[in-house]
Structures are given as structure tokens and as C-alpha cells.
Amino acid sequence: MMRKVSSGVVGAVLASSVLLSACATTAEPGSSRNGAANVERETSRTTTDRPNGDSSASAPEETAPQAPLRALPAAAAELVRQAEEASAQGRHDEAASLLERALRIEPQHPVLWQNLAVVRYRQGDYAQAEQLAMRSNRLSGDYPALQLTNWRLIAVSRELRGDTQGAAAAAEQVQQLRAVGSR
Amino acid sequence: MGSRKRRTQRKVAHARPKRSWLVYLLLLVVLSAPFAVGYVLWLDRQVVAQFEGKRWALPARVYARPLELYEGTRLRPQHLVAEFEALGYRPVAQSSAPGTYSRNGNEFRVTTRGFRFPDGEEQARRAVIRFEGNRVAALSAADGGELPILRLEPAIIGGIYPAHGEDRVLVRLEDVPPELIHALLVVEDRNFFQHRGISWSGIARAAVANVRAGRVVQGGSTITQQLVKNFYLTSDRTLRRKINEAIMALLLEYRYDKYEILEAYLNEVYLAQDGNRSIHGFGLAAEYYFSQPLEDLRLDQLAMMAGLVKGPSFYNPRRHPQRTKERRDLVLRMLHTYGSIDAETAQRAIARELDVSPAPHRSDNRYPAFMDLVQQHLRRDYRAEDLSSEGLQIFTTLVPHVQEAAQRSLDQRLQAIDSELQGAGVVVNVDDGTVAALIGGREAGYLGFNRAMQARRPVGSLIKPAVYLAALSRPDRYGLGSLVLDSPMEVQDAAGRRWEPKNYSGRYHGQVPLWQALANSYNVSTVWLGLDVGLPAVVDALERLGLRPPSRVYASLLLGAVNYTPLEVAQMYQTIASGGYQTPLRAVQSVMDAEGEVLQSYPLAVEQVFDGGEVFLLDYALRQAMRSGTGRSAGRHLPPGLTVAGKTGTTNDTRDSWFAGYSSDMLGVFWLGHDDNRSTGLTGASGALQVWGQTFASLELRPLPDSLPASVEMSWIEPASGLRAEEYCADVVQLPYIRGKMPPDAACVEDAQPRRGRFRGWFQ
């Protein structure tokens, strides 16, 4: 039961991270039906590919307005594009390595840290997924939408590691951000 | 992850006896002695063992971090040139061949060779790089197309060799330029594809030549015999040895085919001596003589190397260029005589100069201290014999120009102070914990004592940030403006000894704000603060920062009476510099096998150990130390506007001079001292800080950001009371505080509250 809920959250996490970061998604670990979450970058945050339209995943806060993110420099964007491709084909180590290179170019960009968190998540490294998402959060001060994604990733990562309390705390953050976003 | 899960699939040509019994029978008759059978069998085993074992013993190649170019790369043009040189790129008027570049003022044109990296293939490209100052302003493909990022090949910084110090760059027969093979066959063994190991006509010809000359001028050895000769480490010329070689050559020919023998020969033949390193094989020789891969060499260069086989020291092109050129030209003429090349091609090649790269391209062991770190890292996952024989490719994090800058700064400083003074340093990337440089001592006379990793020395005041962080991570009790006591005090250690901490200046300051106590590195107030927050809290902070605390803790720990290596200190400061995220330092990013398969990667891992806001408060005090405190003399090295933070450290009787400091992207830790622990006469500021300053001044760095973390806000503080004030109060300073954790209001705030606006106008 717990698992099911979390996989819905994961769907949301992955879908929104795609949008924000231009990093394509593949199935999260342990689930193949969510495969190629083919979310177009430019569209609004449609959630068509989410499994079962889980309640936590289909909440309306996804449409909350967000400040425009500062653009990635072309070099970092190119590496993110390659990482996206690698990750989509399941070559996660390669994707991580590409993102690390992008981070060397632009270490203060929250999206890069978030993408790396997503890749670690897909590899099943929930501890690092959580830490990297926290790191992204530190840099996401002006971007509630990014923070929202990060907190969801943190919540689900904690849950999958058995840290129920921590997951609840993160879920609390998600609720708060939603509330702010819908205002 | 950490398992030795692999064995490279070697391309071993399995020994397959062909007609062997017949051979044995034949040899038996020839030698007509019964024990010869056993002897030949023994030789046979030797041949197989040598051929199988030695042919493929490939040392690991160790690479520096590849240089990445993109719009905005912070890099000085001369560092790009140095990078090209390390890669053996030749400066030319117009770059079109791989491995060449041309420069026109601020604009470089380069043709890369391409490289297979663990995260994908980098194509060979032609690119234009334009600098503006010390920054890449534009990057594009030479045909005008878009090129967002260009990654050069990684420079080779060394190899991991077996004990006897041999190196190889293995070449496969199909990758060897055919001109080289033609040249070798023409000058060394024209009947190679006909004979069975020994060539009677060759021997006859050699005999005739020797009789004519009255001495031994030709050996008459076939390529097979030469290969066998290379299996021995000595080169005595006894008859018995000659007979052994002949028998082994015959055996080799029966066991292996011509192509396998030729390939082994190409990789085995002795071609040069570089100090105590022998250069075997054409792959390595191409690097050694021309700083280029074998595939890139021209006909004249290949002919020169083919000519060297006869006598690498007699025909040493660096020592005897004329002699070598004559030999090379002879080879070229012979190639023409035997129909491999036409007359015009031969003439063109003969017209060329030798074109040997000026200094031997010493790729191995240029950075022995860094290599120690690499080896230590790899020993966790690999066995020594795999590292020296499997042809692994090790991708490290070394940044050559950072390493060079740090070594140069250290050497210069040490030389200027004292000819026996030693030092060490570590430079790491703040965000990902990759080690860019590691200096184990003076460059000259490095004997394997790697001070950066092995010298455990008292760290003195470098420990203080742990004390202050222990306090600042309790924002309910302490802030940067909190007053700490700086007056005579006495402490008892666990052994009951009394101990009186003193400031470096010998003076006391009464009460000082916390940030000033750290920025000025006051000892007494640090001890007071450490005892106030409690030793266990300090030990906990130390541990979270990434250091192993001592097993027994006394108050003297607060002043750094604890030993760490520069590398360990770097780990501690990395956590601070990255805002409370501990990232294990690493020198290796990935390991790839000889076939290009990634065996292991060591990715970025982070763990938040302190709240970012609280670390920012510490960071603020460490910035003040550089602006107006103990580190201010760094200002004369650094460009204006480069905000940095750092901490000096000096131990009793000035035995150790330390400095740890960082910009937004780089952290450097340096130590100066004597190996025998005697006094240096240097403080952290007059010694290590200067080396740090000089190193950082020669890099292109990002300043620390001006922005505040979300959890922090600036507040007016009354320094005399440490209480919250307003701008209109007299003598106030602005300090960062954790939101909602301000100290109580100062008297001036309460008094002024109703009339704030007017007061402001009157008192400014």
C-alpha cells in the first residue's frame, strides 16, 4: 500500500523534473509501466502517463506559477541533453558522469543537482537522491516549483529507505509549498 | 562495487603445437644427445611462458582530467598551450591534421584526435577557440557550425608499472602504419615471411660482411630471433646463448604464426633508454620521440624509428641527429629500392628534418605524489598485478595547470626561505571533492615521502572553525556578535595539569565578538568558547566535518593540539567550503579496461552534515579573517574582487605553518615545516598563506557569492553588548544571523522605538 502511494509520487516527481530540467525520464526503478514518460518539454505539466491517476500525483498545484529559471549555459545544456539520452536508455552511470561535468560548468544551478538526484533515484540510490535533492533545494530559493519537486523526491526517497518520519516531514513541506503555490 | 569482478579477456593466442613432435625428433637427431629432448622441452616452456606472459603485460595508463572548453571557460591562454603541449599537439600555420593547433593572437584553431571516454566517444573535431582575456569568449566548429562544448583528450600523467619499470603503449598489428612494417622488414629481415625462425641466407650474408670488415658488423638475426633476444633481460653473447636463441626462434615459429610474432616484436623491441625507464615497442617510442600516437606519424618519422632498431643508443636522434638522419635516409632509399615507395615520395621524406620533439616527453611520474593518492585509491578495488598488467585506463581528477601552479608556488617560496624547509599542499574542487592537485614536497629530490598524505602534524588554529561551528550550530545560544571572554584563564587537562592558554600577541582583549575572535584567531577566547559549548560538541563538529577525533580529548584540542595530514585537513575544509555538505575527496573518477569497458566509477556523493545557514555564519567570519584578520596579507597576491575565506594555523615555536582557504570553486590547504620538526620561524600567515596566495593568484577563480542563504538575514548589532540594534544606533555593525535567532534588543532600540525616523536624521 505504502509502495503504491509512493510510486505515484515518484511519477509526479519524475514528470515535473522533466519539465523543469529538460531531463527526460525513464521508468523509475522497479516499475516498467511508467516507462518513457514522454512529457514534452514545452507543454504545461500534463500528467497523462501517471499510473492510476493517484491522488497525490494529480493535485492541481502542478500549475502553480513559477519564476523563470535562469537559463543553463549552452555547454551545460548540451551535457544535460546527452545525460537525458543516456538516462533514457538506462545508462545511468554515464548520465551521472555527464551531469557532473555540467555541474563543473555551472555548480550553482539547482536544476543540475536535481537532475543528478533523479538519476540516482532511478538507480535506486535513495540516500544520494535525497541528499542531492536537498542540495538542489538550497539553491532553489526563488523557485518554489523546483523546491516542490525536490521535496517530493526527498519524501519518496525517505519512504523507500524506510524513514517514515522523515518522509512525513518532507510531505509536510510539499503540502506547504502547494498551499503557497495555489494562493 | 568494490569487488574484483573482472578479468580482462586477453587476446591470448593459445599455444597450439603444430607438427611439434616432428620438430622434436628432428632436433633430437641434430643434437644427437638423449637429454636434449628434455632441454628442448624446457626451452619450449620458456618460449611459451615469455610470449604469453610478457607480450601482454600492459601497465595501467593514468590520465589527467581532460580539458573542457566552452563559452565562459575560465582559463589563461598559456594554460591551453600547455595543455596542447602535454598532448603532443604540434603548433602549425594551419591546423588540419589531428593533433595540431594554430594560434593567431587570441584565436586558436585546433584539430583534436578524438578519444573514447568512459561516458562516451569524443569525436575528432576542428574547432576555433577565441579568448577574451582569461576566458573563452567563443567556441565554434571550424566550418562555422555550433559547438557548445569541446573536450580535449586527457593528458597521460603516468603509468602503473610492474616492479622492473617497463612501459608499453600496446599497438595492434592492424593499427600499425604499413610503411613501418615495410621499413622494418626491408632493413631487419627481408625473408621474414619465408624463413622458419632463422635465416640461412641472412647468416651467410652477415658472415660475408663480418669477414670483409674483420669484425662483427652484422648479426644476421631474424625478427624472430630478435624477439627471442628481448625475452632475456641480459645481453651476453655466449655461444650457448646463441644456440638457445636459435632453438627458441624455431620453437616460436612452430607455435605461433607470423602475424603474432610480428605484433609481439613491434611491441617488444627495445628502442630507447629514458633514465631508468626502457622504451620498448613502437607505440611508446612514437610518444617518446615525437610526442604523438604511432598512427599519426609520417613516413620519414616511421623510417627513422625503423632505423633505430639496429642500435638505439648509437643512432640516438637527440644526441647524434646527423648520424640518425643518414640512417633514416638509408632506410627510405631501401624502401624505394624494394618498391614500397616511389622515388618522389622517398625524396620528399629525405628532404625533411628529423623533427624529433625537443625534450623527451616524460609522461610518467611527473606527479609522483598525486600518483600515490591514485594508487592508494585504486588499491581498495584492484590487485597490484592487475594494475600493472591489464592495460587499465585510469581517469583521474588532476588538473595539470593547477598542479603546476601549486608546485611552482611552493618551490619558489621554500627556496626563498630556507633550503631545507619542506612543504605540502592539496587543492580540491569545492563542489565535487575532486582533487585537482596534490604536492608531497619540494619537486626536486622527491624520494617518496608524501607529506600531503603522510605527514601528520599538529594543526594549530586550523582546528578553530570546528569550535566556532559547534557554537554557531546552536543559534539559540550563539551568533556572530555574541561576546566571548578573552581574559587570563586556567584550564586543567585530564592528567590534572594546569594550563594557561595565551594569545599569539601575548595580550588579552577582554570581551570580543565571536566573529572577531575567529577572524583574529584569538586563542584564549577560543578556549573559553569551546569550554562554554562543551568539548563533546566540538568533537562532534570535528567528526561531522570529516576528521577522526583523537581518542582522548583535552582542552588543548581547542587550539589544535591534534595531528592531521594536509589531505585530512582538506576534507574538513571542503565540508565548510561547500556549505556543510561533506563530499569524500577523490582522485579517480573511473576505470576503464583495455577494451573500453567501464569497470568502475567513483561518482560524486554528498551528505549534508551541517545546516547551510550555520556554515554560512562561519564562512562569514572566515571571510573577515581574509579581509581584515590573520589572512589579510593574501590580498597582495589576489586580484581585487576575488572574495575568499580562510584560516591560518601556527603551532608552538613556529614548527608548523598552515593555511586553508577557498574561493567559490577551489579550496587549497598548504603546510610548511621541517621534517625533523624544528622551528621554522614562520607563522601560518608568513609561510603557508603566501604559497596559497601565489597559487590562487595564478588560477582563474570564482569569488564567493555575495548573496545570503534563504535562512540567513543581516542584522544590526551593537558590538559592545552583542545585542540587536538598529542602523540609527551609535557604533553598530551589520552581521548575518539565522532568521528568527536574533539576540535581544539593545537599549538604544527600546529607547528610540517611538521616534525612530527623526533619530535617524539627527545622528548620522
Image (tube, rainbow, N blue to C red):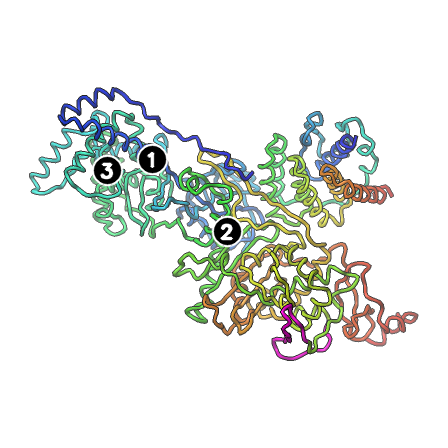
Pick whichever of labels 3 and 1 is earlier in the sequence: 1
| Chain designation of label 1 | B
| Chain designation of label 3 | B
Local SS, label 3: helix
Quick check: can you spot residue A49? yes
Numbered badge on residue B55: 1
Task: Kindly give the residue lying farthest to the bottom in the view shown.
Answer: B507
Residue A36's spot in the image, x, y percent?
Answer: 68, 28
Say above or below: B541 vs B23.
below
Residue A82, picture quadrant: top right
State whether the magenta stretch is mostly helix, strand or loop.
loop
Q: Is residue B24 magenta?
A: no
| Chain designation of label 2 | B
Task: Say which of marks 2 and 1 sits in front.
Answer: 1
Task: Kindly give the residue lying farthest to the right in the view shown.
Answer: B754
Residue B460's spot in the image, x, y percent?
Answer: 58, 67
**Residue drawn 53% across the image and 44% down it:** B589
Residue B744's spot in the image, x, y percent?
Answer: 84, 67
Query: How far is the residue under mark 3 from the one under mark 1?
Result: 13 Å
Q: Amino acid at mark 3?
A: Lys
Q: Is residue B272 left or right of residue B626?
A: left
Q: Which residues are magenta?
A: B490-512
Query: How far is the residue under mark 3 from the one under mark 2?
Result: 41 Å
Residue B265's spot in the image, x, y percent?
Answer: 29, 35
Q: Amino acid at mark 2?
A: Val
**Circle 1 crowding by C-alpha within 10 Å: few under 14, some 14–19, many from 20:** some
Q: Is residue B49 left or right of residue A14?
A: left
**Residue drawn 67% across the image and 64% down it:** B467
Instruction: Determine which residue is flagged by label 3.
Output: B229
Instruction: Determine which residue is flagged by label 2.
Output: B399
Q: Amino acid at mark 1?
A: Arg
